[in-house]
């Protein structure tokens, strides 16, 4: 995963998509927000890796259903709630 801080340099949408074709891109904004750009296949791979990460699993297990849904959205959180 490549991290791009757009507070340090401006990137065009074209540049960000070009990067995302090669690997998952995490975009950090000046105010601390983060966004992910990836192909569907890369995103699926990242999700599978997260599910295998014990530290991440413990973090998710420590959250209640509402916190998980607010983090991932209702549909996407269904898989995490089954951990």
Image: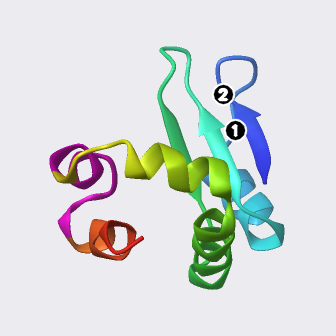
Task: Count the labels in the image.
Answer: 2
Q: Residue furthest bottom?
A: 41
The residue to which callout 2 is attached is: 6
For marks 2 and 1, the one nearer the N-term is: 2
* Region rendered in magenta: 66-74
In the depicted view, which residue is nearer to us: 21 or 15?
21
Identify the residue at horizontal 59%, vertical 80% (top origin): 44
Q: How is the image coloured?
A: rainbow
Identify the residue at horizontal 62%, vertical 39% (top origin): 27
- Write down the quadrant of residue 41 in the picture: bottom right
Q: Residues within 10 Å of mark 1 (few under 14, many from 20)?
A: few
| Disc 2 and disc 1 in contact, CB within 8 angstroms | yes
Left of 2 or right of it: where is 14? left
| Element carrying mark 2 | loop
Picture quarter with the C terminus = bottom left
| Element carrying mark 1 | loop
Left of 26 or right of it: where is 66? left
Identify the residue at horizontal 62%, vertical 63% (top origin): 50
Dominant secondary structure of the magenta stretch?
helix
Q: Is residue 54 above or below residue 43?
A: above
Q: Position of residue 42 (x, y in %)?
A: 68, 76
In the depicted view, which residue is nearer to us: 71 or 52?
52
Identify the residue at horizontal 56%, vertical 81% (top origin): 40
In the depicted view, which residue is nearer to us: 17 or 53?
53
In the depicted view, which residue is nearer to us: 53 or 49?
53
Q: CA distance from mark 2 to mark 1?
A: 7 Å
Q: Position of residue 17 (x, y in %)?
A: 67, 62
Q: Position of residue 56 (x, y in %)?
A: 58, 50
The residue to which callout 1 is attached is: 11
């Amino acid at each position: 995963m490549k991290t791009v801080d757009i507070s340090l340099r401006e990137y065009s949408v074209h540049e960000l998509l070009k990067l995302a074709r090669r690997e998952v891109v995490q975009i950090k904004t000046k105010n601390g927000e983060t966004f992910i750009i990836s192909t569907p296949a890369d995103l699926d791979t990242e999700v599978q890796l997260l599910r295998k990460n014990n530290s991440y699993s413990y973090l998710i297990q420590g959250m209640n259903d509402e916190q998980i849904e607010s983090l991932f959205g209702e549909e996407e959180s269904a898989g995490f709630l089954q951990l």
